[in-house]
Image (tube, rainbow, N blue to C red):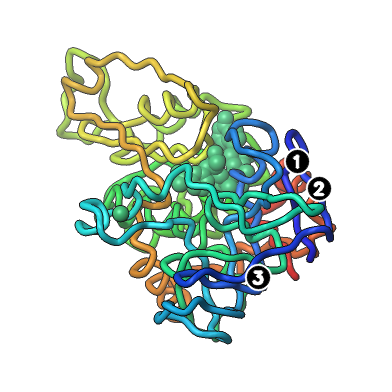
Amino acid sequence: MRGIVYTGGTAEVTDELTVGDPGPTEVRVAIGAAGVCHSDLSVINGTIPWRSPSVLGHEGAGVVEAVGSEVRSVKPGDHVVLSTLQSCGTCRACSTGHPTWCVRTLGNVDQPFTFRGEPASNFAGTSVFAERTVVKEVQAVKISKEVPLTSACLIGCGVVTGVGAVLNRARVRPGETAAIFGVGGVGLNVIQALRLVGASRIIAVDTLAAKETLATQFGATHFVDASANDPVAAIRDLVPPGPARLSGALGWTGGVTWSFDCVGHPAVLRNALDVLDWGGTALAIGIPPQGTEVAVDVNALAYVDRGLLGCRYGSSRPHHDIPLMVELYLSGRLMLDELVTERKPLEGFSEIVSDMEAGKLARGVLTF
Ligand SMILES: NC(=O)c1ccc[n+]([C@@H]2O[C@H](COP(=O)([O-])OP(=O)(O)OC[C@H]3O[C@@H](n4cnc5c(N)ncnc54)[C@H](O)[C@@H]3O)[C@@H](O)[C@H]2O)c1
Ligand SMILES: [Zn+2]
Ligand SMILES: [Zn+2]
């Protein structure tokens, strides 16, 4: 079958893949569509170390083709969005509603594929850049057939990550203010979730001025072109201290309640901390190379209740959040179709990558 294989330093489109039958608790899915997330590019460029050969892609949706003998929640013909979390369902994290903290969900690698006759690994437990993949039952979340698979696939990472960061991790309340660094597939979903919950000022920041149109379409109230402006100064100008606020001895007043680093660069995360109002919190969503550190004056946190939170996969509970995203889409309150700016067959992967790097896309989607 066809797919995209990471062979170490590069990705190859191939028709020399096979995938095995599902085990008792597994599901085989015929992929209908797959979004290209920056994390796939990060494997190819070495930011996220991964073994090779492996089948890329982790943002996908498709149709169940075969199920193992113990599978009860889906059957052949069902439409599913694939979650990357192979959560065990029985540990303390799973039992308290935090599958993203389940130790079984990170770094686990299976080899359901062969590439040119040799075993090949999956990526992020999913591998949706292939005509078919095999996942655990817990990863296949049934959805309504009303959602086109080209839109549904994006829920599998970008949507759940961005919307989940706002709803689950930050829990932004109406009227609060926010800055979003990086108007890509993840950042746009942070922006539309902020609009959904009634944030008052939604300030989008990108180094590509052309991203302003998309940012505004998804709900940004302001846009800062970080290639031409100091984003920290610009955001402080947009959200000055309130009239009742005295300028304190530390001189840090004004700024936003929430900031979201959807880029994954230490300078961006530092900016995200520097734009916070007293009591504000920054969320680290972007993934830089391992070992990346950010320096911060501890006083800038400790004296004024500022915080920094990591956020993986929108701190989501996929069997709750994926149906929720579908419901919000079907009721017209979450934009998915508008995220798809380009569709191409697998052979168009490198074009999607270069358009993504040129800032032309919200998301590029591979079709099968
Ligand atoms: N934590 C998680 O669970 C999770 C999930 C998905 C993706 N990610 C990570 O999130 C990041 C974003 O992913 P994506 O798919 O949205 O990427 P993307 O390529 O679609 O978008 C990135 C955006 O950031 C902009 N950008 C680059 N440098 C910038 C800077 N210095 N200041 C402001 N904007 C800048 C780019 O122009 C682009 O618009 C990646 O690091 C990805 O690996 C994390
Ligand atoms: Zn992703
Ligand atoms: Zn668990």
Ranked by sequence position, the earlier of labels 1 and 2 is 1
Amino acid type, residue under disc 3 in the picture = Ile
Q: In which quarter of the image is residue 328?
A: bottom left
Is residue 243 among the parts visible in the rendering?
A: yes
Task: Give the residue at x 28% y 40%.
Answer: 257
Question: Within 8 Å: ligand 1 and the Cβ of disc 1?
Answer: no
Q: Quadrant of residue 28?
A: bottom right
The residue tagged with tag 1: helix, strand or loop?
loop
| In this view, 293 is above or below 330 | above
Q: Do the residues labelled 2 and 3 touch (CB within 8 Å)?
A: no
Measured from the top left, where is residue 47 in percent x and y? 60, 31
Q: How crowded is mark 2: few (under 14 residues within 10 Å), some or many (20 or more)?
A: some
Q: Mark 3 points at which residue?
A: 31
The residue tagged with tag 3: helix, strand or loop?
strand
User: Rounded to the nearest whole Å, what is the CA distance between mark 1 and mark 2?
Assistant: 7 Å
Q: Mark 2 points at which residue?
A: 12
Q: Nearer the viewer, residue 40 or 353?
A: 40
Q: Residues within 10 Å of mark 3 (few under 14, many from 20)?
A: many
Quadrant of the rendering where the C terminus is positioned: bottom right
| In this view, 298 is above or below 83 | above
Q: Name the residue under label 1.
A: 7
Q: Do the residues labelled 1 and 2 touch (CB within 8 Å)?
A: yes
